Image (cartoon, rainbow, N blue to C red):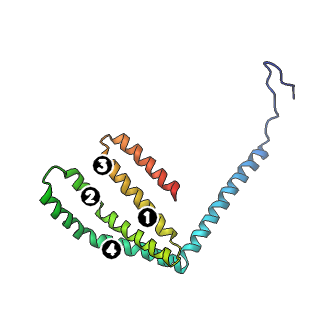
């Protein structure tokens, strides 16, 4: 080692291959341990009575949303056709496209409130509701923004925010 003076660089001995391998191994070990812990927590959540109830809430909401979407669309078309003929066609198409996810989301939030009253964990249904919220917001924003690249950027930002929220 040389003392550092003006214009001089301090020389360090080259790192040994074993040190690099040890660093990489310890980093990979930390990541795999974290993923293993997350998997075990998810497994414990899903393979319990509360997890089964949560999955049931998700699938019942999915079925109800699917079954009620067609009558909901017909109802919207009936009332929208009387009030506005062509002025709001773009908004009408957006609303018709979002009937199913909005019905499903309404069920999820209602069921989550009921589960909270019974002090039942609802991690999975809350995650699905958050992602569904993000999807609905993204659909609304993308339908308003005409520039495709800006819409894609906004959608990417919204998905990143939604994933960080989970």
Image quarter (top left, top right, bottom left or bottom right) of the N terminus? top right
Instruction: Check disc 4 and report its element: helix, strand or loop.
Output: helix
What residue is shown at x 44% (from left), y 47% (from top)?
156
Instruction: Check disc 3 and report its element: helix, strand or loop.
Output: helix
Residue of label 3: 143
Q: Position of residue 101 (x, y in %)?
A: 34, 63
Q: Position of residue 4 (x, y in %)?
A: 83, 24
Residue 109 picture quarter: bottom left
Instruction: Check disc 2 and report its element: helix, strand or loop.
Output: helix
> Separation of disc 2 and disc 4 at Cα?
18 Å
Q: Nearer the viewer, residue 85 or 38?
A: 85
Q: Earlier in the sequence, mark 3 or mark 1?
A: 1
Q: Earlier in the sequence, mark 4 or mark 1?
A: 4
The disc label shown at residue 95, or none: 2
Residue of label 1: 129
In this picture, is 19 found above or below 163?
A: above
Mark 4 and mark 1 residues within 8 Å of each other at the beta carbon: no
> Separation of disc 2 and disc 3 at Cα?
11 Å
């Amino acid at each position: 080692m040389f003392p550092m003076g003006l214009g001089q660089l301090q020389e360090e001995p080259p790192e040994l291959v074993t040190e690099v391998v040890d660093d990489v191994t310890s980093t990979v070990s930390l990541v795999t341990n974290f993923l293993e812990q997350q998997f075990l927590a998810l497994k414990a959540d899903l393979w319990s009575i509360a997890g089964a109830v949560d999955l049931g809430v998700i699938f019942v909401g999915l079925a109800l949303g699917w079954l009620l979407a067609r009558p909901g669309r017909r109802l919207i078309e009936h009332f929208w056709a009387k009030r506005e003929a062509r002025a709001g066609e773009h908004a009408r198409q957006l609303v018709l496209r979002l009937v199913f996810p909005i019905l499903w989301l309404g069920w999820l939030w209602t069921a989550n409130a009921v589960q909270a009253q019974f002090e039942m964990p609802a991690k999975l249904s809350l995650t699905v509701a958050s992602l569904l919220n993000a999807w609905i917001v993204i659909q609304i924003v993308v339908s308003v923004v005409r520039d495709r690249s800006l819409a894609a950027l906004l959608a990417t930002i919204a998905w990143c925010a939604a994933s960080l929220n989970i």
